[in-house]
Amino acid sequence: MADPFPFEVPEISGPIASHITKLERAYVVPPPKGGPNQSVQRSGVLTAEGAPVENAVTWRGTTPVTVPPAMPEGEVDQLEGRWLFLGPLFGHFGHFLVESICRIWAVDQLRGQLDGVLYVPKFQNRPEHVANVYRPFLEALGVDLPMRNIEDPAQVEQLFVPRQGFGMFQMIEGAPEFRAFIRAHAGKTVAPEGSAKIYISRSELPGARGSVLFERRLEGWLEAEGYVPYHPQKHSHLEQIAAYRAARHIIAVDCSPLHLLGMVGDEGQKVGVIARRDGDLDEIFARQIRAFQGAEARAFNHLRRNWIEAHGNRPSRTSWGELDYPALRESLMAAGLIKGVEAWEEPTEADYEAELDRIAAAAGHRFKPWDGPKGKAPGDGD
């Protein structure tokens, strides 16, 4: 029988400023080159003597996504200077927004004591390209230090390893220090620019990405209410920040861009989050937005059922939500997000057949209805 995992989920409901481990000649160890993109990677930090460092473990809810690595063999790179360890650098934007920035709160705590920040790749796929993509975005969140993504094991002259201060599920509201850092810095160098009312849309993502059935109709109904469909994937990270800072009313199905909205928005916004899959992610996004910026954020779950891949067994980022649109309209009206200028008619049986054919053609496979238990968390991603 395998030994139990030696560390516990970090507690972040109260202050964590004192939870920064300072190390001399510690080892920073990335995942092995050529390895697969596993859900749990052996990477992180070891002391000079080879002991695992608890703060270096990154958690997703109650599950670690990194576990302590083995001691590197042979000669390793020597990195001089004072560095802050930030954990795994995800290429996936949603995971970056939750799990790759969860330690940046310590930048303010250690101001003037650092030469830069260090990541390890989530897995070894073009690590320098991923770093280049996120460097300007990280700076816009308030990390004004050189950033490196370590491809090979390195022994670091002086390393600071802070506790994770943010994460999914029970950690979505963040530690006090993390929220304070985000409020002080995130997006402040980017001028607001864009429409006052936006609907964050998934309708132009690849067919395998999932959304809600009849999203184009939803867009049309919201356009009649003055909303402009917004497709984040068509804009740079800085342009997205500008749009989310400008908007006063925002509606979206549950999706990764809401993590960014929660960081760069403000208390004057009204936000509606529509559930597109079982798992209460709509509530989780709304909780983050309320906790970080004090905005008025409401979750709306009018799911009738989920349509999942024919070979699947639960809802995920690739599934499609079947919504009760008339009921959603009433809820959005009650929340003051729309006026109800048009009726939102129930699609016909023929409409459903055509829509399911459309998404099957786009995804390359059929979908089946799933009427499983409410509250089962989706597996991954946005």
Image (spheres, rainbow, N blue to C red):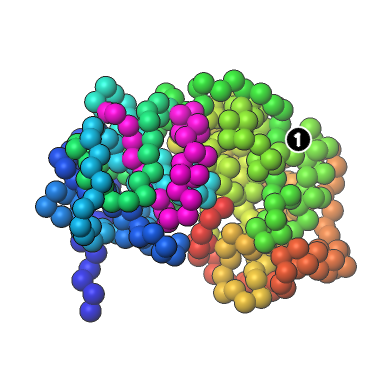
Residue 120 x, y percent position in the rendering:
36, 48
Query: In percent of the image, x 70 and y 52: which residue is there?
Result: 205
Query: In percent of the image, x 81 and y 50: which residue is there?
Result: 217
In the displayed structure, 166 sits above or below 6; it is above
Mark 1 lies on residue: 227
Q: Residue furthest front?
A: 75
Residue 185 x, y percent position in the rendering:
44, 25
Query: In percent of the image, x 23 and y 75: which residue is there?
Result: 2
Residue 73 x, y percent position in the rendering:
21, 59
Tally of marks:
1
Q: Quadrant of residue 339?
A: top right
Q: Residue furthest bottom?
A: 1
In the displayed structure, 246 sits above or below 62; it is above
The range drawn in magenta is: 114-141
In the displayed structure, 71 sits above or below 114; it is below
Q: Residues within 10 Å of mark 1 (few under 14, many from 20)?
A: many
Is 137 magenta? The answer is yes
Query: In percent of the image, x 80 and y 50: which residue is there?
Result: 216
Quadrant of the rendering where the N terminus is positioned: bottom left
